[in-house]
Amino acid sequence: MRLQVNIHKDFGKFQLDCSFETESGQITGLLGGSGCGKSLTLKCIAGIEKPDRGRIVLDDKVLFDSECHINLPPQKRKVGYLFQNYALFPNMTVAQNIAVGVADKAARKETVSRLISSFYLEGQDHKYPRQLSGGQQQRVALARILSSQPEVLLLDEPFSALDSYLKWQVELELADILSAFSGPVLFVTHNQDEVQRLCQQVCVLDHGRSQATRPVQELFKAPRTLSACLLSGCKNVSRARPTADGMVEALDWGVVLDPGRPLPANLSHIGLWSHCIQPVDGPGPNRLPCQVERVVENVFSTVVMLSTPGGTREFSRLRLKLEKESWAALAGRNPLWLELPSKDLLLLTSN
């Protein structure tokens, strides 16, 4: 089963242009910052919002087609939508909430009983949502969705309503549930760790525009755009300019670097993961002297903030992450010479 999305919606100052595909057995992450259009995309797929133009197709069933004037109502789309706050009916019990989704009245009791057992909700069936933990509420919401036998699942930041101590257990439970679902799954989040743990592929949304869908590991190993790089968690980014001899001038860091490979067209920035930076003894290729500005001690590592020859503010600073023992051997060096290895440089375009 394949879900194909190609839609546009105009809100004046904000425009959504989103295009991607996902298939059965795939969990596709929609990754982006607040206000980039992730939830709006899900609402368009579910039929809650109507795009201005485009197509949404689930296998051979057209859910929306602006040219053919097709716009199926939500109840005919066979789409299961998990809202951020789960949207349980507060005046209904667990069993009643789940029963809402069962269309076959004859099978309602059996279906509810089966889902309560499958979602480990035994003994909770007569309780109301306010009497449940956040993880239990999520399981009830998912059971209600699956009771309607959806062909695709839309999960809108499913952990945002949970306290941090609950998230880990609920995430494990959700992973088990999704592994048993046979259709496509869209997972909306702004958290790169959730994408890395739960999804097989990811589509980055930046100010309403979708980028090419990529395997998750490829995104985190080699992001191609500035927005994808920042969303992947990379903290070291500089504006960049190609030089005539094939080198790259990192404008914010105040250094010219050898990328070790051809530059992409429209290069605009360069990036580097904190753990890839290597402290060295002195000058050399791809090296620069830095001043230690701040040292942050974590439980198992040390983060060092450094100013570069390019300055002391924003992108001009570098973030170095080391094991505690490694930093202890370097403490006191100022300036601290760093090498930015060619093989680890991220060559980025603006879009």
Image (cartoon, rainbow, N blue to C red):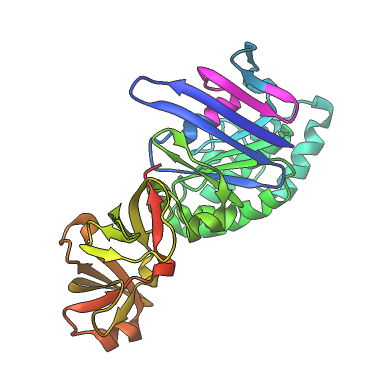
Query: Any magenta on residue 214?
Result: no
| Direction from residue 336 to residue 59 in the image, left or right | right
Q: Is residue 94 above or below residue 342?
A: above
Viewer-side residue, 219 vs 143: 219
Q: Residue furthest bottom?
A: 329
Q: Quadrant of the N terminus?
A: top right
Question: Residue at 41% across / 50% down in the picture?
Answer: 231
**178, 334: nearer the viewer:** 334
Res. 120 in view: no
Q: Is residue 59 magenta?
A: yes
Which residue is drawn at the image coordinates 73% and 49% (left, top)? Answer: 180
Residue 334 vertical position relative to residue 348 in the rendered view, above or below: below
Q: Is residue 68 visible?
A: yes
- The range drawn in magenta is 42-62
249, 306: nearer the viewer: 249
212 vs 52, nearest the viewer: 212
* Image position of 32 with respect to 318: above or below: above
The x and y percentages for residue 185 are: 64, 42
The image quadrant that residue 20 belongs to is: top right
Residue that appears at 38% across and 59% down: 234
Q: Is residue 109 left or right of residue 62?
A: right
Which residue lies most toward the top here? 69
Position of 42 with respect to 106 (left or right) is left
Q: Position of residue 181 (x, y in %)?
A: 72, 45
In x, y percent, where is residue 17? 47, 29
| Screen quadrant of the C terminus | top left
Q: Residue at x 65, y 12 (%)?
A: 68
